[in-house]
């Protein structure tokens, strides 16, 4: 109980000092936590609402997930820019389980051979991806296994007008992971901002911890009358000059590759549309076997510590010229995964808040490439790549400092955003 109270205090007292928009400073708290019940509970759809200036979001206990995020575009039309379901109860029964807006854990992304070694001991965890006749459950573990953190209901421990905190206790041995882990996730809305802070403590044994946020974005609110995809979105990764090499099932090989200027994976020399190279046949296989597009872990090469108060460049910038909505992502994490939603096939329904205003004749589903996932995280599967030297970032035990992830999403719709993206990048 003492450690839980201490973590809530950490969430409440720690401050973000991140730029609100280019050239401006922002200072806010990570939580403003109160006892649950001081704010209203879930609505009739099982969702908790929080609000900031020019922004409103809904969250659900399942996976500590964001379910809706509302912003006005440059025409003043409100857009819901993240994928999800209308009712919280559907998240638990949907068989595709696309990880909509949740917190994957206790280890995000993929773990090679569903195993790792800590202090000379091999741990075999539950596989759940890439099944074969010899391995019917799968060859690897994705996002913590078949009952990972974003498959479970978290507890709401604090809820105010502009902030909500969820908690989850992951028991020793769950999905094969050693030791108990206690985690808290706080989401806070400000002036066109969404801040998040994730804290996790290994309480009984040494164990890997690496979290992320798995939000599906479409800055047009799936309402663009020119395209049903998000390939029109411009992406800039100003620190992303390198990426982690992966095999055909997206398991890291151990190699680090350079993103040569002008190449398919170059989003750092200048912003470009995500779909800019989709006509290039070399993009086939770029996101795995027979996959065209991106499911790529870019390294964020900066010199620590990161001085966000001084107007540091965001690690990522995503913008739609159609809606004019732009999001700048700031984080303390050292990698950034981009997934261009190649696995979507038109079978996932849009919410009732999406696909409105002029596209009513279009199928109300998420089409292939209809979204983009941006995951703040550490180097993927680094627990199986000791030569990378990421152990202090991913291996934690009792008495260690907690695992902490911080991220801030800064939204803007002003006309100067076009110039920030570069001529012709639209």
Image (cartoon, grey):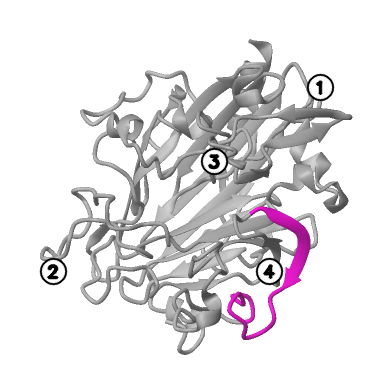
Q: Earlier in the sequence, mark 1 or mark 2?
A: 2
Q: Is residue 102 above or below residue 297?
A: above
What distance separates the C-alpha of mark 3 from that of mark 4? 41 Å
What distance separates the C-alpha of mark 4 from that of mark 1? 33 Å
Q: Is residue 15 above or below residue 166?
A: below
Q: Residues within 10 Å of mark 2 (few under 14, many from 20)?
A: few
Q: Earlier in the sequence, mark 3 or mark 4?
A: 3
What distance separates the C-alpha of mark 3 from that of mark 1? 43 Å
Left or right: residue 97 versus residue 129 is: left
Where is residue 269 shown, x and y percent of the image?
Answer: 64, 81
What distance separates the C-alpha of mark 4 from that of mark 2? 38 Å
Where is residue 264 shown, x and y percent of the image?
Answer: 58, 79
Q: Is residue 396 above or below residue 322?
A: above
Residue placed farthest to the top in the image?
1
Q: Earlier in the sequence, mark 4 or mark 2?
A: 4
- Circles 4, 2 touching at the beta carbon (< 8 Å): no
Left or right: residue 147 versus residue 92 is: right
Q: For this rendering, which residue is in front, 247 or 342? A: 247
For residue 425: magenta?
A: no
Q: Earlier in the sequence, mark 3 or mark 2?
A: 3
Q: Which residue is mark 4?
A: 239
Q: Kindly tell me whether residue 338 is visible in this rendering.
A: yes
Q: Is residue 3 above or below residue 336?
A: above
Q: Earlier in the sequence, mark 4 or mark 1?
A: 4
Q: Earlier in the sequence, mark 3 or mark 1?
A: 3
**Numbered mark located on residue 358 in the image:** 2
- The residue located at (11%, 63%) in the rendering is 360
Span colored in magenta: 251-269
SS at mark 1? loop
Q: Which residue is mark 3?
A: 133
Q: Residues within 10 Å of mark 3 (few under 14, many from 20)?
A: few
Q: Quadrant of residue 275?
A: bottom left
């Amino acid at each position: 109980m003492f450690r839980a109270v201490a973590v809530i205090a950490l969430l409440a007292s720690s401050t973000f000092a991140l730029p609100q928009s280019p050239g401006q400073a922002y200072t806010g708290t990570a939580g403003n936590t109160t006892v649950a019940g001081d704010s209203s509970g879930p609505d009739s759809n099982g969702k908790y609402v929080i609000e900031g200036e020019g922004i409103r979001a809904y969250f659900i206990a399942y996976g500590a997930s964001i379910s809706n995020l509302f912003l006005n575009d440059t025409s003043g039309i409100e857009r819901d820019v993240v994928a999800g379901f209308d009712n919280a109860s559907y998240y638990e029964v949907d068989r595709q389980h696309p990880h909509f807006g949740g917190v994957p854990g206790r280890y995000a992304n993929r773990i090679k051979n569903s195993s790792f070694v800590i202090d000379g001991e091999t741990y075999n965890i539950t596989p759940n991806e890439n099944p074969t006749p010899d391995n019917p459950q799968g060859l690897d573990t994705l996002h913590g296994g078949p009952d990972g953190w974003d498959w479970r209901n978290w507890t709401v421990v604090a809820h105010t007008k502009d902030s909500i905190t969820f908690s989850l206790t992951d028991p020793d041995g769950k999905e094969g992971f050693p030791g108990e882990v206690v985690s808290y996730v706080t989401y806070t809305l400000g002036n066109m901002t969404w801040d998040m802070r994730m804290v996790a403590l290994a309480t009984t044994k040494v164990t890997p911890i690496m979290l992320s946020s798995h939000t599906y974005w479409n800055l047009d609110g799936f309402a663009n009358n020119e395209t049903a995809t998000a390939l029109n979105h411009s992406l800039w990764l100003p620190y992303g000059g390198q990426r982690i090499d992966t095999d055909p099932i997206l398991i890291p090989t151990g190699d680090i590759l350079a993103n040569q200027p002008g190449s398919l994976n170059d989003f750092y020399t200048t912003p470009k549309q995500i779909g800019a190279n989709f006509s290039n046949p070399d993009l086939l296989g770029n996101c795995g076997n027979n996959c065209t597009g991106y499911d790529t872990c870019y390294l964020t090469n900066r010199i620590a510590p990161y001085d966000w108060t001084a107007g540091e460049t965001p690690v990522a910038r995503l913008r739609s010229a159609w809606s004019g909505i732009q999001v700048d992502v700031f984080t303390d994490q050292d990698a950034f995964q981009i997934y261009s939603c190649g696995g979507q096939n038109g079978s996932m329904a849009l919410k009732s808040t999406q696909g409105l205003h002029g596209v009513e004749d279009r199928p109300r589903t998420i089409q292939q490439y209809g979204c983009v996932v941006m995951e703040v995280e550490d180097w993927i599967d680094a627990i199986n790549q000791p030569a990378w030297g990421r152990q202090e970032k991913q291996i934690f035990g009792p008495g260690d400092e907690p695992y902490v992830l911080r991220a801030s999403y800064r939204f803007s719709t002003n006309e100067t955003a076009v110039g920030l993206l570069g001529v012709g990048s639209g």
